[in-house]
Image: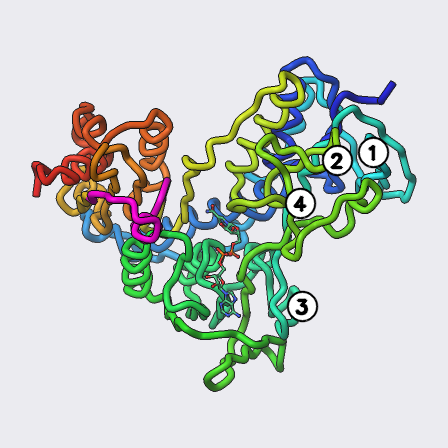
Amino acid sequence: MPDYDVLVIGGGPGGYVAAIRAAQLGLSVACVDENPALGGTCLRVGCIPSKVLLESSERYEETLLGLGEHGIRVEGVRLDLAAMQKRRQKIVTILTKGIDGLFRKNGVTRLQGRARLAGAGAALVTGADGAETRVEAGSIILATGSRTADLPGVVVDGQRVLTSTETLELDAVPGHLVVIGAGFIGLELGSVWRRLGAKVTVLEYLDRILPGIDAEIAADAQKLLAKQGLVFRLGCRVTGARAEGDGAVVDIADGEPIACDRVLLSVGRRPNTDDIGLETVGLSADARGRIEVDAHLRTTVPGIYAIGDIIAGPMLAHKAEEEGVAVAETIATGVGHVDYDVMPAVCYTEPEVAAVGRTEEQLKEAGVPYRAGSFPFIANGRARSLGHTDGKVKILAHAETDRVLGIHIIGPHAGDLIAEAAVSMAFGASSEDIARTCHAHPTLAEVVKEAALAVDGRAIHI
Ligand code: NAI
């Protein structure tokens, strides 16, 4: 008899959710993670701590620059970075402990150590003291996540040339931070340190920022972020970076080296699949480190499944969570499903950028006939009262059926507004469905309704 029905390797958003769902379905489950704190990159050094610092830094900047127009005079505002960082740590601790609580509530066994597959149906777990335990399970779910991808020539030392992890934990505001890569991580963390007083230069290889996001929305984001003071150098290929003297130097393909105080490397992430014993079951990862799975998240080895950042698709916590639920349901019931066509993405800059479904470029490339409708936040009463009027909602709907194919938002609370877009698309809504649904007034969500009306050329407030 195996020790457990299911062993989950990795306690991040994919793994811990899979463990809880499998336990809910009556299976005996263990989840192994080498880190004492559950929650993976997302909770410990990713989504959550970055959102905490984004919130704190936004409040700091608003207090300095934004309260005057509300008729609120403040004096003597100063940054207490140590207190800000303490709050970040506290929130992370509360949330990671929360997962321990959820495991207890659901009867999931928590194992601590580094796990490697050890042939079909088994894993070896090495504890911090070096002791090895063999664990056998009917099904094994690999959910080992990802780490910062290397860039040839860039020597990360954790002191001056940093990954996102150290950039979250800085105890002083750098004079000049150079960010390599204008993706989600670069723009979010670049925004944090710019707001707190750093000069921030973002070097991006492509001729645009935010690859994958609708080009019109990404161009709007670039304009707004540049207005705030982020310096963008597009079409700029970084060939190296290293600590030098008191700071660091970044080499670029066509131009002079750039001297700065700190460097953030954010050119993507690499799946953690090198040292998890794949060879012991005859599995291997592809050139990008990913494991191949079928539509049911099954690897080619019976009883072994893979989810989250180690398989194809966007490296997003909520994508991993959906897969965690689906894989547990597949194991317990034979049926589990993820709707990859309705997978929202949010970049938590100010304003936020959020998207679900297909971009205009993708529709053009696929030759899909569409109609587009946009509506700006500046024409919305709630946005005016918030003082956050930059941005727009853009809806793309099929030209013949009117089915919504993509919704793209840049603006206040875009990350929350995108939920309506995702639910609409999950139910196969037409733009007419959204346009004819009563939206409360005055709310930011009215901009979504007006954009849907605009698809048919009948927005009211513009
Ligand atoms: P990314 O893939 O989003 O962006 C990396 C950028 O680096 C790209 O624009 C790429 O063109 C550029 N680049 C690559 N090589 C370069 C070079 N030699 N010189 C200059 N630029 C170069 O990767 P990022 O930002 O590191 O994020 C990693 C993952 O984490 C992504 O999948 C992202 O979606 C996810 N993430 C999600 C967040 C969210 O949901 N809010 C927040 C942070 C990360």
Across and down, in percent, residue 307 comes to: 62, 37
Report, in whole angstroms, how far the alpha carbon at label 1 lies from the one at label 3: 38 Å
Report, in whole angstroms, how far the alpha carbon at label 2 lies from the one at label 4: 11 Å
| Residue count near mark 4 (Cα–Cα under 10 Å), binned few <14, some 14–19, many ≥20 | many
Q: Is mark 4 within 8 Å of ligand 1?
A: no
Q: What residue is shown with label 1?
A: 120
Q: What residue is shown with label 3?
A: 157
| Residue count near mark 2 (Cα–Cα under 10 Å), binned few <14, some 14–19, many ≥20 | few
Please state which of the two labelled residues, at mark 2 or mark 3, is closer to the viewer. Answer: 2
Q: On residue 301, which mark appears?
A: 2
* Chain-order first, disc 1 or disc 4: 1
Residues at circles 1 and 3 in contact by the CB criterion of under 8 Å? no
Q: Indicate whether 102 appears above or below 154.
A: above
The amino acid at mark 2 is Val
* Chain-order first, disc 2 or disc 1: 1
The amino acid at mark 4 is Ile
Please state which of the two labelled residues, at mark 1 or mark 3, is closer to the viewer. Answer: 1
Residues at circles 2 and 1 in contact by the CB criterion of under 8 Å? yes
Report, in whole angstroms, how far the alpha carbon at label 4 lies from the one at label 3: 29 Å
Mark 4, secondary structure of its residue: loop
Residues at circles 2 and 4 in contact by the CB criterion of under 8 Å? no
* Chain-order first, disc 2 or disc 3: 3
Mark 1, secondary structure of its residue: loop
Residue 361 inside the magenta-drawn segment? yes
Residue depicted at 27% across the width and 56% down the height: 216
Q: Which of 350/395 is in front?
A: 395
The amino acid at mark 1 is Ala
